[in-house]
Image (tube, helix red, strand yellow):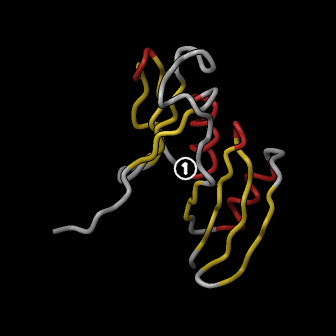
């Protein structure tokens, strides 16, 4: 039997298309699917062939009574990249600040804030 692995996470955001565009630009991901979703909402699934983030927006972000209404109810999202410096250069060129740089086992890393105060950790193990 294959070990368990994370296939996706579903995160409520204010603008799924803009967040998807940012993630595709930075990490060379693709939009896997987009369309109508739970509670008359809208979702964009962005990632690669193995895993993705479901970026969800309910029809009325602050009015709907739902378990999917809380913005960015996560501490951070970790993304592994091959070339940490190249990805950081892309982020900085977009006017986005990076912070909390670390170089400790098992790899190098930094963080940045995306839409809706979603903290993203970018890490390289090479």
Q: Is residue 67 left or right of residue 70?
A: left
Q: Is residue 87 left or right of residue 125?
A: right
Q: Is residue 97 left or right of residue 122?
A: right
Q: Secondary structure at mark 1?
A: loop
**As drawn, which residue projects farthest toward the front?**
65
Q: In the rendered image of this protein, does residue 60 appear above or below residue 78?
A: above
**Towards the viewer: 10 or 33:** 10
Residue positioned 80% across, 58% down in the render: 98
Mark 1: give few (<14), some (14-19) or many (20+) Cα within 10 Å: few
**Towards the viewer: 45 or 28:** 45
Quarter occupied by residue 83 = bottom right
Residue 97 placed where, x, y %? 83, 52
**Towards the viewer: 44 or 89:** 44
| Residue placed under numbered mark 1 in the picture | 28
Picture quarter with the N terminus: bottom left
Residue 30 placed where, x, y %? 47, 42
Quarter occupied by residue 5 = bottom left
Q: In the rendered image of this protein, does residue 53 appear above or below residue 55?
A: below
Residue 11 placed where, x, y %? 53, 39
Picture quarter with the C terminus: bottom right
């Amino acid at each position: 039997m294959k070990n368990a692995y994370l296939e996706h996470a579903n995160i409520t955001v204010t603008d799924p298309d803009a967040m998807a565009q940012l993630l595709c630009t930075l990490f060379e991901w693709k939009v896997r699917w987009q369309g109508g979703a739970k509670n008359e909402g809208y979702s964009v699934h962005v990632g690669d062939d193995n895993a993705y983030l479901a970026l969800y927006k309910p029809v009325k972000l602050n009015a709907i009574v739902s378990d999917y209404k809380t913005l960015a109810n996560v501490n951070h999202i970790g993304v592994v990249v091959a070339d940490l410096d190249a990805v950081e250069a892309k982020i900085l060129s977009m006017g986005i600040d990076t912070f909390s740089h670390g170089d400790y086992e098992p790899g190098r890393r930094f963080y940045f804030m995306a839409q809706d105060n979603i903290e993203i950790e970018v890490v390289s193990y090479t």
